[in-house]
Structure formats: structure tokens, C-alpha cells
Amino acid sequence: MDRTFLLAGAIAGLIAVAFGAFGAHGLRGRLTPDMLAVFETGVRYHMYHALALLLTAAIAPRLPGKAIVAAGWLFVAGIVLFSGSLYVLAVTGVTALGAITPIGGVAFLAGWAALAIAAL
């Protein structure tokens, strides 16, 4: 599982950097400042949790069990749901997707809780 989360973290980090550059260079002037801030929030949390996936991969061999695996998958889900919904909201203006964002936030919180449980 550690290689899976290493790969997921590396790919998530790559995408976060690409989206950050796209937001800074491709979207500035095309989005309102408020929507650009929404996009940037998505990028920030995306990168934080790409790093969390790398941490999960690094410590997974030392913390066997279901909690560490759950933490990794919850971080992945959070990136997709939280950051993904913010990206789509910012670019399309479809506000209905804002209802998905808190689900992604809960996935992030649950991932950190699972990581804490794995440490115990």
C-alpha cells in the first residue's frame, strides 16, 4: 500500500503544481478575484494533502493496519471532492457543486483522524 500512496501523492503533487501555475497564469484576468481565491484554496489543500499522502506512504510500513490505509484513501477522496469541487466551481460558476466541498473537507478530517489512530 505504501507504493500506492507514494504514487498517488506524487501524481497529486504534480497536478497541484500544474493547477497552481494554471491558476496564476491562465486564470488571472479571466476569473473574478473571489473565484480565483476559491481556485487557489483548492490548490493549497490539494498540495497539503499530496504531502500527507507522501507522509502516509513513508510511515505505512511501520504502522500496519487498516487505519493507515483508510487515512491514505480518505486523503485521496478529500483531494477529489474538496479540491475538485472548488476547481469546477471556480472555472464554471456552477454553485451546486459547492455542496460537495464539505464532504471532501470531512474526508480530509477523517484522514487526519485515521492517521492519528494509526499512530496509537
Image (spheres, rainbow, N blue to C red):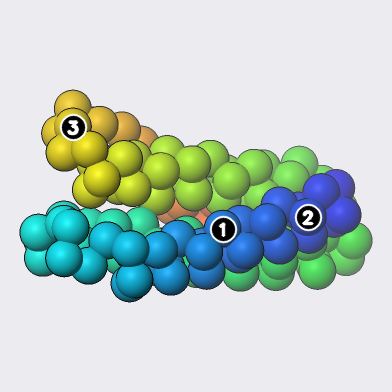
Q: Label 2's element? A: helix
Q: Which mark is residue 100?
A: none
Q: From the viewer's side, name the closer residue of 100 and 32.
A: 32
Residue 106 x, y percent position in the rendering: 39, 44
Residue 103 x, y percent position in the rendering: 35, 36
Quadrant where the C terminus is found in the figure: bottom right
Instruction: Give the labeled residue for mark 3.
Output: 94
In this rendering, does residue 116 appear at all? no
Residue 100 vertical placement versus 17 (above, below): above
Left or right: 22 in relation to 70: left
Residue 80 x, y percent position in the rendering: 49, 41
Q: Name which quarter of the figure residue 13 lies in.
A: bottom right
Q: At 31% from the left edge and 40% from the top edge, which residue is drawn?
A: 88
Marks 1 and 3, how far apart at CA = 22 Å
Q: At 25% from the left edge and 45% from the top edge, which residue is drawn?
A: 91
Q: Label 3's element? A: loop
Residue 59 x, y percent position in the rendering: 80, 67
Instruction: Give the labeled residue for mark 2.
Output: 7
Q: At 81% from the left edge and 49% from the top edge, which residue is drawn?
A: 4
In this rendering, the label closer to the viewer, 2 or 1:
1
N-term mark: 2 or 1: 2
